[in-house]
Amino acid sequence: MLDAHQLVKHFKGVRAVDGVDLVVRPGERVSLLGPNGAGKTTTLLMMLGAILPDSGWVRVAGHPLPKERSQAMGEVGFAAGYLPLPERLRVREFLHMFGQLYGVESLRDRIGTALERFGIAHLAGRLGTELSSGQRTLVGVVKATLHRPRLLVLDEPTASLDPDVARRVRAGLSELCDSEGTALLLTSHNMAEVERLCERVVFLSAGRVVADGRPASVASRFGRSDLEGVFLHLAEERPAGAQQTDRTA
C-alpha cells in the first residue's frame, strides 16, 4: 500500500531524513514514532508527495510520486488536528462538498455512517464556528475516511481530545480497518494509544529508522517495559548513539 525507499531530505545543510525505508501493507496498522526533531513530519510529507525527497522514492497504492500523485492521493485519506475547517459551513455541508469532490456514491448514507462510526452524528448541523478543537479534529477524521481510502494517514489525531473521545476515535478506527481493510499510518506522542491501536511501530531517531516491529518486541529489545520507555530513551540519548537500525519481529 505504501512503499518508501531510502528517503533523504536536507534542510539548510542538515540531513533531516537519512535513508528511511518504510513499507505499509494492506490492512496493516503502523505508527511512525520518535522524539521531536527525529524526522517524522518530514518523512510523512514526503510519503504524501507534499515535499520531494532529495533522493529515494515513494509509491502509494502502486503509484509513483510525484508523477502519479493525483491517482495516489485518490487512495489516501489524511487528517491532523491542526488542519482548519470551513467556519461558515455546517458539518454535513462540508462533508457533502468533500464527498462530491471524490465522487463518493450514496453520499448521504455514507456521511451518516461515518458520523455514527465516530459518535458525532449530533454535530451534523453545526457550523465550523460552533465546534470545539476536539470536535473539529473528529470531523477531520470523518472527512478523511469518507471516500473509503485504502490508506489512512493521521498526524496526532487525538492530541486535542479528552480520554473518552479519544477512546471512541480508536474504536472507530479499529472498526474501519477491520471492516474495510484500510491500512493505517499514524503519528502520535501517546504511546499507550499506539500500543492499543497499532500492530507495528517504526521509531525514528536523527532521521533514521532505529526500530521496526511489534510494540512488545521493540520495547523488549530496548530493555524497556513499554513504548513510553523507548520514547524517553531515544529522547534522552544523543543522536550518534541511535544510528544502528534494529528490526524486530
Image (cartoon, rainbow, N blue to C red):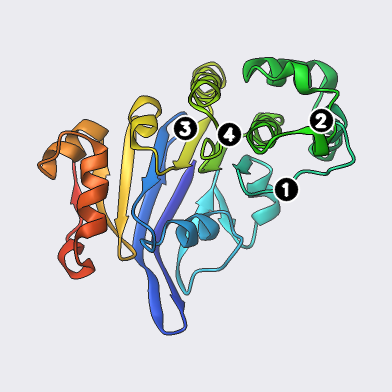
Q: Nearer the viewer, residue 110 or 194?
A: 194
Are discs 4 and 3 less than 8 Å apart at CB? yes
User: Which of disc 4 and disc 2 is earlier in sequence?
Assistant: 2
**Going 34% across and 66% down the picture, which residue do you hit?**
19
Number of other residues with Cα within 10 Å of mark 1, as a class: few under 14, some 14 to 19, many 20 or more: few
Q: Does the residue at mark 2 contact the one at mark 4 (Cβ under 8 Å)?
A: no
The disc, 4 or 3, on the residue closer to the chain's N-terminal end is 3
Residue assigned mark 1: 84
The answer to whether residue 178 is above or below residue 6 is: above
Q: CA distance from mark 2 to mark 3?
A: 30 Å
Q: Secondary structure at mark 3?
A: loop
Q: Amino acid at mark 2?
A: Val
Q: Position of residue 156 (x, y in %)?
A: 50, 43
Q: Which residue appears farthest toward the bottom when viewing the image? A: 13
Name which of mark 4 and mark 1 comes first in the sequence.
1
Q: Mark 1 or 3, which is nearer the eye?
A: 1
Asked if residue 84 lies left or right of residue 197, the reply is: right
Disc 1 to disc 2, how far (Cα)? 13 Å
Q: Percent x, y for residue 26?
A: 47, 32
- CB atoms of marks 2 and 3 within 8 Å: no
* Quadrant of the image containing the C terminus: top left
Q: For residue 37, what is the image quadrant?
A: bottom left
Eye-nearest disc, 2 or 4: 2
Where residue 117 sits in the image (x, y, percent)? 63, 17
Q: Which residue is mark 2?
A: 91
- Taking the spot 59% from the left edge, 59% from the top edge, the residue there is 49
Q: Earlier in the sequence, mark 1 or mark 3?
A: 3
- Asked whether the residues under the numbered discs 1 and 2 touch, taking CB atoms below 8 Å apart as contact, a structural biologist would say no
Instruction: Inspect this view and state whether residue 194 appears.
Output: yes
Residue ID for mark 4: 150
